Image: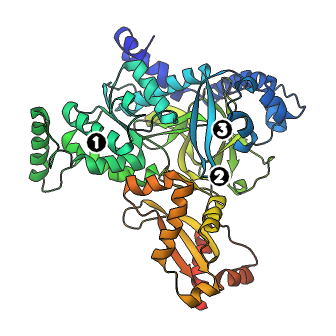
Amino acid sequence: MKLKEKLNRHSPNQIWDEYCGFLTLSLDQYLHIQNRLMQEQIQLWCASALGKRILNGAQPKTVAEFRRVVPLTTYEDYADILLPRRSELLPAPPVTWVETTWEGGKRPIKAAPYTQGMIDTFRRNSIAVMLLASANGWGDFTIGDKVLSGLAPLPYLTGLMGLILDQEFQFTSMPPRETTTTMGFSERSKLGFKMALNKGIDYFFGMGSISYFISTQLTHIGGGSHGHIPLPTLLRYARAQNRARHENRELLPKDLFHLKGFVCAGTDNARYKDDLEHLWGVRPMELFAGTEATLVGTETWNRKDLYFFPDSCYYEFLPEEYIRSNDRHLPTITIDQVEPGCQYELVVTVFKGGAFARYRTGDMYRCMGFGDKDDHSTLPRFRYTDRIPSVIDIAGFTRITENSISEVIELSHLPIADWCAAKEFDSQTGHPYLRMYVELSASALTTQAVNEEVLRKHLEIYFNYLDSDYDNLKKILGMEPLQITFLRSGTYAEYRRRFANIPARINPSSEIRRALLSIQEDL
């Protein structure tokens, strides 16, 4: 029975308990679900050709044995099976495949199989997200039917969520879902804007960065020349303008619309939530998902911390001190062993015939405590912090690694003698960008042929060549994603002499960056 039918036949309390009741589980009940589903997955995974290859002769029977003998894995362990989509080698037959960015032009995509069991779980948890996003408290939810979407279409995971919710409730999606695969982002946004102004909005779904971009553009659609504009749209716009004028401020989306629910996905949402709340008068609720891991967690109506769904994956947590290590046998802990204030990389084994086992997601979470009276929960609460330090993810658009920057520098033939790069944040807006700390070769310094603007333009050519998402970052978000700091010749050599170590190329600590700047002032 689909959600639309359930809303007619069941009470709100029954619907809430079915989809959001996991919040009231005790930790013992939560672990029981985790271990039961993990036991089922162990049987499927170990019997598959993929599992046998990774197990290398081992035959674990229990969850403890599985964690002991299966090494931590990354996408490289699966690529030769998943990229050619060799379904016959997997634990269960997939019904669809989902894609995401991998690593620039060298390895452009990852593909992940989704079984029917995974889709069913994804469906149930997507509905939970929708209910929680529209709730004002425990069980107090409303359902609307008009959705403004800034989410990418299939084969991306966000497209799967849109498809599932349409099947469950027959939402009016703006823009229509059938147009999203044939139109570019700008075209989709304009069509969505026009429909929203005509019909209104109940829900807004998008990545934090994209939602911010859409929000800053939305209030300009009513002005200027846009062809025939229906009378209801003009009236809506006129009332909103009067409201803003009366309060002596600019027109904002909250003057035009009254959202029932606002959902953000992706990274760096925390950097946009305050701005989005100001624009819409509603604070976005974050969900947490990954192509390999599926939909794993959500915040609740209080928009503070997230809870992991018990039926998506088996969760393990790699302590922060091990995150930069590539050792495949690092110690992990389970969800009942996490400590408030500590940060971890999430490691998952996907249930219901999923391909990924003890998979390092590259996503970092901080445990914020256990339970919250407002959420009616005693479970561990988490907050997403960022990607692991070896990856620079800017606003959910692009994943920059040491390999990708090295390849850019090699292709460009620029006279760069040494470098490191870090994700930093604008002091005014708080929005993220990429900063490179660059030391030029002695020959470049003597000719004075390279300045910051020349270097940035040259590097951007090759970033765009290797990674189309980088180009989208600049075009769609209207931001300059690359900033460059020049260091004097010999800065890196002097750092190594003073500290007897080599700074990480990607995301060196703020202390290391300050040391480099201090050293170059001394030279």
| Residue 496, placed above or below residue 83 | below
Residue type, mark 3 in image: Ile
Is residue 359 or residue 16 the one in the foreground? 359
Lateral position of residue 333 relative to residue 438, left or right: right
Lateral position of residue 12 relative to residue 217, left or right: right
Q: Where is residue 221 in the image (x, y as percent from the top left)?
A: 21, 45
Q: Can residue 261 be seen in this view?
A: no
Q: Can residue 449 be seen in this view?
A: yes
Q: Earlier in the sequence, mark 2 or mark 1?
A: 2
Mark 1 crowd level (few <14, some 14–19, many ≥20, 10 Å Cα): some
Q: Earlier in the sequence, mark 3 or mark 2?
A: 2
Residue 335 image label = 3
Q: Name the quadrant of the C terminus.
A: bottom right
Residue 106 image label = 2
Residue type, mark 1 in image: Lys
Q: Is mark 2 on a helix, strand or loop?
A: loop
Q: To which residue does mark 1 refer?
A: 190
**Residue found 46% across the figure and 20% down from its top:** 17
- Residue contact between numbered discs 1 and 3, judged by CB atoms under 8 Å: no
**Residue found 67% across the figure and 28% down from its top:** 354
**Residue found 9% across the figure and 37% down from its top:** 235
Which mark's residue is nearer the viewer, 3 or 2? 2
| Residue 351, placed above or below residue 269 | above
Color encoding of the figure: rainbow
Q: Is mark 1 on a helix, strand or loop?
A: helix
